[in-house]
Structure formats: structure tokens, C-alpha cells
């Protein structure tokens, strides 16, 4: 354990000369760029391009090949003698190639493309929402690491103070002004500080690995997280991407409604049938013949038992459901903002109190320092007061980090990343 401790201390000391800065905004940008979910945006675009290409194929001629061979029990016969008309064969054969070309589709194809485009926008915005929801997790990680970083600095200051005090006590022991073995208490406390360094460094390395996985970038142990100064808006207006998602969902329903309105419109096709068979188009010609038919046809579903109307009514209800979801989201987010603002106010009051406590603790420690030099108190009593100051300073640092975390979360809740 001592070797590990020494190694970590050496590692941090060497890293002090090459510390790499990393800011909270850097982490936000890296998540938006490197998190695996980001790949879905490109995949959705590729999928949409394929779907639209497939829809546009409906504008091209459609070819159908058919062939059949039949045997029927009875055929047409002319019951007049000496007409020279031979009845057709009971075995008949036919192969045809049919070409259909859409001439007028009532705007159905363009509406289908609009639906696909609306679907793409909605899905991409959902990806953005999912990425945005990672920001709170990122905040927690970032400020947890930052707290460990600040705790280490404070522990280093305590170590420096104890080492300086140890030299004074050792000098006092030699001069007979301080009780023997007083230095042992200080040395034991320094060993405990080394254990604290080990715990802090191991926790920090673990959290750095988790943060690196989240932002998709390697983070070395020498990376120094910057302490941000975060400002919050006094406005309660919400700018979250979820609000845009609700609007896009409604637009998606509107395009679907437009598509439904066009499904029952008449459609005009041009067609041509070419074939070869026995008989051909003339059923009285008992031989293999080539033939063709060309023309126009109209398809119009004039009555669908109100099925299309019911589908549009269902879409209208879905719009109302989305409006309800948006209202609930807005309400819950406003409540969450109020709660977060209360948390900010509470922590701010704690910080003011912490600063008063530390001021008093320093006065007590200065008195204890003088008493230790004069042999009035033991090293243990001095360490108690030093530890009390360290604990309260640690509390102040914790509250300061918590305040910045609360502000960062407030901005995430509001949509001001």
C-alpha cells in the first residue's frame, strides 16, 4: 500500500508540469460528438434516403409478367351447320406482359415523401433529446471529479502545514521546550494524510475512466478539470429540446393527415398488355397469336365505410395527447426549476455560514499553534484543531462545488446548456 501511495503521489507530482485542462463545455461538446447514440443521426438519414427512393419508384412504369396454361371441360360452339367455324381447343395457353404507368395519383406520392421527411425530423430530434438527457449524468461526474481534485489540494495544504509544524516540534524537543514524542503524533497524522491521498487518487481515476467512456475521449490522470463559474438566468422560460420534439410530432401527424386525405382521391393509370397465346384475342382463331391492348383506367374508392374519416379522427386525438404531454412537461419542468433554485439559495446560505465558521476556526488554530510552541498543549490537541479547520474548509469546498453543480443542473433543466 505504501508503494502504491508513493507511486500515485509521484504520478500526480510529475503530472503537475503537464496538466491538461478540460472544461465542462468541452465535455458537453464531446458527448454531442462522440457518444454512440450520435451515430443514429446519420443512420436515420441514410434510411430516410432509401425510403424516399423507394416511394419515388412508384412514379416509374410497373411491369408484371404472367403466364398460364388451362384445360377446360367445355368451350364455345356455334350450333349452325356448315359455318366453317371450328370450336376453340379445350387446352389454352397465354403469356402476357403488363405495363402500368401512374399518370395522376392525387399527390399521394409527394405526400408520402413529406411523411417520411417529417418522420426523419422527429426521430433526429428524439436522438437530440436523448443526448441532452445525458447532460445531468455528465454534470454529476464532472463535479464529483472536481470535488476530489479540490479535496486533494486542501489535503496538500494540510500536509504542508503539518510538515512545517513537525519541524518546529522537533526543534522544540531538541531544545526541551516541547514534550518528547510530540513529533510522533504529527508523523502519524502525516501517514494518515498519505492514506487520504491514495483514496482520493484511486476514486478520481475511477471517475475519470467513467467520464472518458461517456465523452468518448481518453483522459489521462494528469488532466485538470477547470472549475466553472456558472451563471443562471432569472427567467423561468424553458428552452428544452423536448418542446421542439412535441411540435415536430404534431407536424408529423399533420403530414399523415394530409396523406390520408389523398388516399381516396381518384388515380389515373395508363396501361398496355402485350402477349402471346392460343387463342389470342380472337377466341375463334385456334392458333398461337401475338396480341396487345392499350388504354387508360381510373381507380377511385368512392366509399370506404368512413374508414379514412375515422383514421383522421384518431390522428386528431393524437394531437390532443401530444398537447397534453407538452403541458405536463412544461409544468413538471417549471416545478423542477423552482426546486433547483431553492437548492441554489440554500447552498448559498450554507457557504456564507461556512466562511464565518472557518474564520473562527483559524483564530482557534492560531491560539493552539502558539500554545503548542510554548508547551501548553500537546500535539494531539493541535491536530484536533487543525482537523476541525480542515473539515470545515472541506465542507466549504463541498458546498461551493455543490453550488456550481446545482447551477449547471438548473441550466440543463431550463435548456440553457
Image (cartoon, helix red, strand yellow):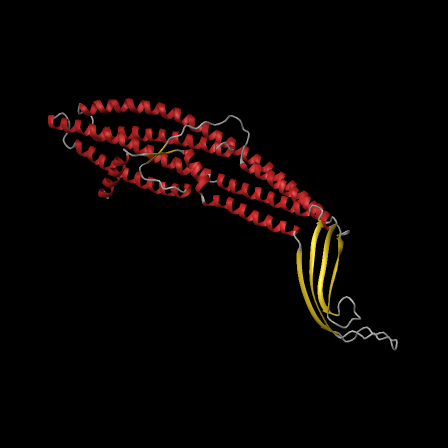
Q: Residue 183: where, in percent of width, then height?
A: 17, 32
Q: Is residue 378 visible in the rendered structure shown here?
A: no
Quadrant in which the N terminus is drawn? top left
* Res 141 → quadrant: top left
The residue located at (48%, 29%) in the rendering is 342
Question: Residue 404 location in percent, x, y?
Answer: 42, 30
Give the quarter of the image for residue 253.
top right
Q: Residue furthest bottom?
A: 81
Viewer-side residue, 86 vs 269: 86
Which residue appears at 44% of the width and 40% of the height? 31
Question: How many numbered discs sit on the rendered protein?
Answer: 0
**Rendered image quadrant of residue 114:** top right
Q: Could you say where residue 276 lies in the image, as x and y percent from the top left?
A: 71, 67
Would residue 1 appear left or right of 244 to someone viewing this image?
left
Q: Is residue 149 above or below residue 317?
A: above
Q: Can residue 321 be seen from the camera position used here?
A: yes
Viewer-proximal residue, 210 or 277?
Answer: 277
Residue under the image location 26 percent in, 40 percent down: 8
Q: Residue at x 39, y 33 (%)?
A: 23
Residue placed farthest to the left in the image?
175
Tell me residue 65's x, y (percent).
66, 63
Q: Is the residue 91 above or below the residue 158 in the image?
A: below
Amino acid at each position: 500500500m505504501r508503494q502504491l501511495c508513493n507511486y500515485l503521489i509521484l504520478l500526480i507530482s510529475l503530472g503537475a508540469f503537464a496538466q491538461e485542462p478540460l472544461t465542462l463545455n468541452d465535455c458537453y461538446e464531446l458527448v454531442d460528438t462522440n457518444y454512440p447514440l450520435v451515430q443514429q443521426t446519420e443512420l436515420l438519414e441514410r434510411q430516410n434516403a432509401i425510403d424516399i427512393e423507394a416511394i419515388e419508384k412508384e412514379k416509374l412504369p410497373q411491369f408484371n409478367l404472367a403466364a398460364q396454361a388451362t384445360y377446360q371441360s367445355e368451350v364455345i360452339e356455334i350450333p349452325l351447320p356448315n359455318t366453317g367455324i371450328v370450336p376453340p381447343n379445350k387446352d389454352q395457353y397465354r403469356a402476357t406482359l403488363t405495363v402500368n404507368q401512374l399518370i395522376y395519383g392525387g399527390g399521394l406520392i409527394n405526400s408520402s415523401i413529406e411523411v417520411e421527411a417529417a418522420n426523419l425530423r422527429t426521430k433526429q430530434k428524439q436522438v437530440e433529446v436523448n443526448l441532452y438527457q445525458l447532460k445531468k449524468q455528465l454534470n454529476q461526474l464532472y463535479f464529483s471529479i472536481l470535488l476530489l481534485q479540490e479535496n486533494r489540494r486542501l489535503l496538500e495544504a494540510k500536509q504542508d502545514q503539518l510538515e512545517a509544524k513537525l519541524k518546529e516540534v522537533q526543534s522544540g524537543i531538541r531544545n526541551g521546550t516541547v514534550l518528547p514524542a510530540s513529533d510522533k503524533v504529527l508523523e502519524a497524522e502525516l501517514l494518515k494524510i498519505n492514506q487520504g491521498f491514495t483514496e482520493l487518487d484511486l476514486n478520481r481515476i475511477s471517475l475519470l475512466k467513467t467520464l472518458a467512456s461517456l465523452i468518448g475521449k481518453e483522459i489521462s490522470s494528469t488532466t485538470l478539470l477547470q472549475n466553472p463559474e456558472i451563471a443562471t438566468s432569472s427567467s423561468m422560460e424553458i428552452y428544452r429540446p423536448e418542446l421542439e420534439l412535441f411540435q415536430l410530432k404534431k407536424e408529423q401527424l399533420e403530414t399523415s393527415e394530409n396523406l390520408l386525405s389523398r388516399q381516396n382521391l381518384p388515380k389515373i393509370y395508363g396501361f398496355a398488355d402485350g402477349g402471346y397465346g392460343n387463342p389470342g384475342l380472337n377466341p375463334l382463331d385456334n392458333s398461337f397469336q401475338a396480341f396487345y391492348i392499350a388504354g387508360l383506367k381510373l381507380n377511385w374508392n368512392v366509399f370506404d365505410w368512413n374508414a379514412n374519416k375515422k383514421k383522421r379522427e384518431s390522428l386528431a386525438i393524437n394531437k390532443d395527447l401530444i398537447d397534453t404531454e407538452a403541458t405536463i412537461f412544461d409544468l413538471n419542468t417549471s416545478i423542477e426549476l423552482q426546486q433547483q433554485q431553492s437548492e441554489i439559495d440554500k447552498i448559498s446560505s450554507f457557504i456564507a455560514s461556512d466562511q464565518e465558521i472557518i474564520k473562527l476556526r483559524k483564530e482557534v488554530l492560531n491560539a493552539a499553534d502558539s500554545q503548542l510552541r510554548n508547551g501548553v498543549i500537546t500535539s494531539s490537541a493541535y491536530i484536533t484543531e487543525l482537523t476541525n479547520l480542515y473539515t470545515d474548509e472541506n465542507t466549504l469546498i463541498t458546498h461551493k462545488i455543490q453550488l456550481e453543480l446545482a447551477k449547471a443542473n438548473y441550466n440543463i433543466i431550463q435548456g440553457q446548456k
